[in-house]
């Protein structure tokens, strides 16, 4: 009987610990000197503006009107069930990407001059994300490109 009670308590504590895995967004997200925040040393972050090759990902590229491309990205993000828009300006978007237990912060910065959208996605907690941020961003890239082809 005592063994079962201890097991129940341990499972409850473990479940509560997992439910608290969303964490809070870092206070320094956003645009700093025309760039998104860099990644920490941990492998749970990817960014298009980093020099670290393991964390580097290509920005989203587009042709044509930058404002239309950024609007298309916002529509693509709005169509995802795992994404919540947190902040939006004409050249910057911040979203939360949710999985069953975790929240990741995604950021997008319109670079009109180079016709790209700089990207960053990072887990709030933990050391490794097992490649989730990169896989999600590549899926988003495919959706963004497909939305462009569907408009042609």
Image (cartoon, helix red, strand yellow):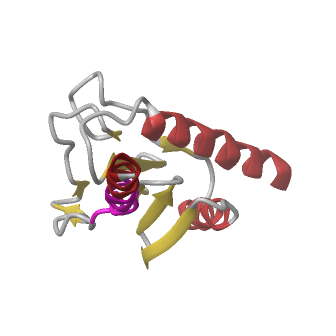
Q: Please tell me whether residue 30 is drawn above or below residue 57 in the rendered image.
A: below
Indicate whether residue 21 is drawn in magenta: yes
Rendered location of residue 21, percent (x, y): 34, 57
Is 43 situated left or right of 141 in this image? left
Rendered location of residue 141, percent (x, y): 59, 41
**Region of the chain picked out in magenta, as a range:** 12-23
Identify the image quadrant of residue 17: bottom left
Identify the image quadrant of residue 111: bottom left
Q: Name which residue lies at 46% across and 54% down.
A: 101
Q: Name which residue lies at 61% across and 47% down.
A: 63
Q: Name which residue lies at 44% across and 40% down.
A: 133
Nearer to us in this view, 19 or 79: 19
Q: Main secondary structure of the magenta part?
A: helix
Indicate whether residue 104 is drawn in magenta: no
Identify the image quadrant of residue 54: top left
Rendered location of residue 130, percent (x, y): 41, 30
């Amino acid at each position: 009987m005592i063994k079962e009670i201890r097991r129940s308590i341990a499972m409850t504590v473990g479940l509560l610990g997992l439910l608290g895995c969303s964490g809070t967004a870092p206070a320094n997200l956003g645009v700093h000197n025309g760039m998104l925040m860099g990644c920490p040393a941990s492998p749970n972050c990817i960014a298009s503006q980093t020099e670290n090759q393991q964390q580097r990902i290509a920005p989203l590229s587009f042709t044509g009107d930058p404002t239309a491309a950024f609007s298309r990205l916002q529509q693509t993000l709005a169509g995802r069930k795992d994404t919540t828009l947190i902040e939006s300006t004409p050249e910057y978007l911040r979203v939360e990407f949710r999985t069953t237990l975790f929240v990741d912060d995604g950021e997008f910065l319109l670079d009109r001059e180079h016709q790209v959208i700089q990207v960053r996605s990072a887990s709030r907690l933990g050391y490794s994300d097992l490649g989730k941020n990169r896989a999600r961003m590549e899926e988003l890239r495919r959706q963004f490109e497909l939305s462009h082809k569907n408009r042609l």
